[in-house]
Amino acid sequence: MYGIQIGYARVSTADQDLTSQRGALLRLGVLDSNMYVDHGLTGTNRARPGLREALAAVREGDTLVVTKLDRLACSVRDARDIADELTMKGVALSLGGSRYDPTDPVGRLLFNVLAMVAEFERDLISMRTKEGMAVARAKGHLKGTAWANEGEASSDVDALKRRGRGRPGRGAEPA
């Protein structure tokens, strides 16, 4: 007999919605009261309060349920670290309804392949974003955001430097 199911969901941006992940977790048997979420945090950020709470909530015999591995971790290292922590606690991991068994060689292989695919997908997204920004910059569409008081702040800094106030080693002597 298995313990309770603890669900974890994450979206990367504030514009995204957790509704579909919450619905999937409910269909997988996770009670709403046992769901932990992170809203607007990327998978590369391990300092996620919802993940920390979910990992603290699971006990031996429980199952941590996520809809997809990339909601849990976006790198092989993080996925392995989380899986190892769960294994040490005696907690199973369910990815979209499929249980991961770390003691089974085939289960371990499949988990590692999924982790590599999640990391690969994240790298592709990053590469496409950088390429798109470079094209936009070349066309003059991406220039960055000017500071609202850029001229004012710049003149204040220049005035301080003229009066000899600045950080040593940065072009000004200490006052």
Image (cartoon, rainbow, N blue to C red):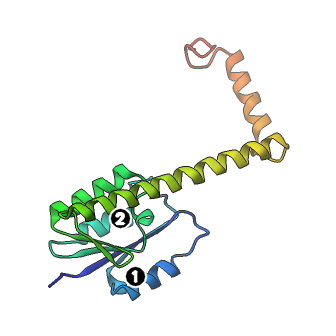
Amino acid type for the residue under numbered disc 1 = Leu
Residue under numbered circle 1: 25
**Vertical side of 52 occupied by 23: above or below:** below
Circle 2 crowding by C-alpha within 10 Å: few under 14, some 14–19, many from 20: many
Rendered image: mark on residue 96: none
Q: Quadrant of residue 5?
A: bottom left
Quadrant (top left/top right/bottom left/bottom right) for the N terminus: bottom left
Helix, strand or loop at mark 1: helix
Q: Is residue 143 visible?
A: no
Q: Which residue is painted at 63% across and 13% down in the image?
A: 171
The residue labelled by disc 2 is 51
Residue 101 rendering spot, x and y as whole percentages: 23, 68
Quadrant where the image shows the C terminus: top right
- Residue 169 percent coordinates (x, y): 56, 13
- Which residue is located at x 26 percent, y 60 percent? 108
Nearer to us in this view, 68 or 31: 68
Q: Is residue 100 above or below residue 152?
A: below
Other residues around mark 1 within 10 Å, as few (<14) / some (14–19) / many (≥20): many
Question: N-terminal of the two: label 1 or label 2?
Answer: 1
Give the x, y percent position of residue 80: 30, 54
User: Can residue 12 be seen at all in this image of the molecule?
Assistant: yes
Task: Looking at the picture, tell me which residue is in the foreground, 150 or 61.
Answer: 61
Q: Amino acid at mark 2?
A: Leu
Q: Which of pointers 1 and 2 indicates the residue nearer the eye?
A: 1
Q: Position of residue 85 (x, y in %)?
A: 22, 58
Q: How many marks?
A: 2
